[in-house]
Image (cartoon, helix red, strand yellow):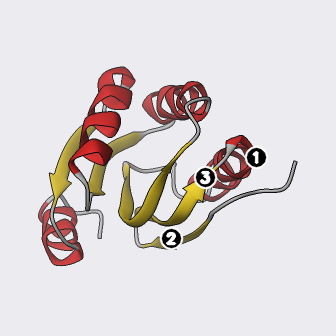
Amino acid sequence: MQEHGSFDMEIINQTLVIKCFDSWNYETVSRLCIEYKELAKKINNKPWACLVDLTQWELSTPDMWDQIDELNQWGNINNQKYEVVICSLSIQRDLMEDSHNVLTNVETKFCNNLTQAYEWLKSVGVY
């Protein structure tokens, strides 16, 4: 099946920055998980963070959450220490909070905008 929705990812210092766009399906999430791990392996020799910008994301099919849980578990054992999430909808925050239950070694923060997110990442020394 063809992907729906998209994302951009880049590494800035010890932070993997993900910007999410439109509505996602299973195929989009599968590609995100593969690319996420490939990029994170470039910085996981030291504590690192993930910034997830959901301000342009329109949710996804429910089958994505098992993949996200697996990705979060991977982060736990691959030196991820921080995650900051920017949400534009309250349902996004609710869904992400549920998915973060598996982030046992990762400190999580929810912010309203990129400025707040970057300030927090700077304060913990990864941006």
In this picture, residue 114 sits left or right of residue 53: left
Q: Mark 1 and mark 3: span between their CA atoms?
A: 8 Å
Q: Quadrant of residue 30?
A: top right
Q: Amino acid at mark 1?
A: Glu
In this picture, residue 55 sits left or right of residue 40: left
Where residue 24 is drawn, which disc sits there?
3
Residue in front for this viewpoint, 79 or 62: 62
At horizontal 84% and vertical 55% (from top left) the residue drawn is 2
In this picture, residue 96 sits left or right of residue 125: right
Where residue 99 is drawn, which disc sits there?
none
Residue topped by disc 1 = 27
Query: Closer to the camera: disc 1 or disc 2?
Result: 1
Residue in front for this viewpoint, 82 or 125: 82
45 in relation to 66, above or below: below
Q: Amino acid at mark 3?
A: Trp
Residue topped by disc 2 = 11
Say what secondary structure mark 3 lies in. Answer: strand
Residue 104 visible from this viewpoint: no
Q: Mark 1 and mark 2: span between their CA atoms?
A: 23 Å
* Residue 5 spot, x, y in % from top left: 63, 63
Disc 1 or 2, which lies upstream in sequence?
2
Disc 2 or 3, which lies upstream in sequence?
2
At horizontal 55% and vertical 31% (from top left) the residue drawn is 62
Say what secondary structure mark 2 lies in. Answer: strand
* Residue 112 spot, x, y in % from top left: 15, 65
Quarter of the image that includes the C terminus: bottom left
At horizontal 50% and vertical 70% (from top left) the residue drawn is 11
